[in-house]
Image (cartoon, grey):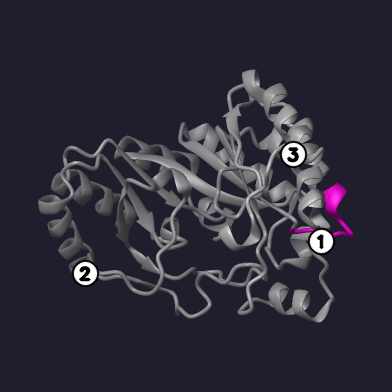
Amino acid sequence: MHYEGTVIRPPSEAFSIILQVTVGCSYNKCTFCGAFKDKRFRVKTDEEIDDDLRFASQHCRRQNRVFLADGDVLILPQHRLSALLGRIRASLPWVKKISLYGNARSIRSKTVADLAVLKGQGLDRIYMGLESGCDEVLERIHKGETAATMIETAQRVNDSGLFLSATILLGLGGIELSEIHARQSAAVLNRMAPRQVAALTLMPLPNTLIGRQYQSGLFRLPDQLGILRELRTLVTGLELSRSMFHANHASNYLPIEGVLSKDKHRILAAIELALAGHTPLVPDNMRAL
């Protein structure tokens, strides 16, 4: 497989075939994200992609899922994305599910009917970064979205029948907006109704604006207990009947997961034990993005 730069994927795609279709992110303005700062966005040629498909057809026959990288494959025009899904099915007929990242802007470039067509061609899941349900936080991180546009975008995915996974970043509001960031994020997630909620913890990177603000003292990140209190507020506010909750990313201090409809009390009890000091937290030198 021909990968350019560091290729990232969600934790749940650990055993997927990673097919790099785009390099970088078409937006790439978020102040917290350093994943693509060294990449100029481009779409790989069909020849490059097909070469990787030929490799996967020979060497990845035990993997039945495909994840399309990098950060923004959904920005491809509908005809090209549809053709790509067709080529994947032809080259890898044993693959059952195809997933990708989709920011709100690229999702809105597709109609509900467009998304439904892609679902019929094998696309199963869209990973969308909400980051925060607080408009002030979204403005500070240059997300280019509001809580209202995020809710509208999620509805489009849900109406198409695709599986929506929404990501929230603990700590993103800093100490100043910690409580409102967690509380409003829960409220927005309730209206988005994703099938999966993934909570990560902010790790300020030196190649990002928020990382430089952190180093200079302009941005103050909550400590471990502050992050756990955010997590508690977030989970307490979530009222989702058919959603999974995952906080098992390598950036988190307390790896937990469950189905909210039946495990919410257990998750909250685990957080309380950690806050009381009865559960060891992941040390900073073991955390990663």
**Going by the image, does 12 lie left or right of 128?**
left
Residues at marks 1 and 3, CA–CA distance in whole angstroms: 21 Å
Residue 72 is one of the magenta-drawn residues: no
Q: Residue at x 65, y 64 (%)?
A: 203
Asked whether residue 244 is in view, the answer is no
Residues at marks 3 and 2, CA–CA distance in whole angstroms: 48 Å
The residue carrying mark 2 is 48
Q: Residues within 10 Å of mark 3 (few under 14, many from 20)?
A: some
184 versus 39 height, above or below? above
The amino acid on which the numbered mark 3 sits, given as a three-letter code, is Ala
27 versus 162 height, above or below? below
Q: Residue furthest right?
A: 176
Q: Position of residue 120 (x, y in %)?
A: 32, 35
Q: Residues within 10 Å of mark 2 (few under 14, many from 20)?
A: few
Over which residues does the magenta segment extend? Answer: 172-181
Q: Residues within 10 Å of mark 1 (few under 14, many from 20)?
A: many
**Going by the image, does 22 lie left or right of 232?**
left
Question: Quadrant location of residue 244?
Answer: top right
Q: Residue at x 19, y 51 (%)?
A: 87
Q: In the rendered image, which quarter contains the N terminus?
A: bottom left
The residue carrying mark 3 is 274
Q: Could you tell which of marks 3 and 2 lies nearer the N-terminus?
A: 2
The amino acid on which the numbered mark 1 sits, given as a three-letter code, is Gly
The residue carrying mark 1 is 174
The amino acid on which the numbered mark 2 sits, given as a three-letter code, is Glu
Residues at marks 2 and 1, CA–CA distance in whole angstroms: 42 Å
Q: Position of residue 61 (x, y in %)?
A: 15, 44
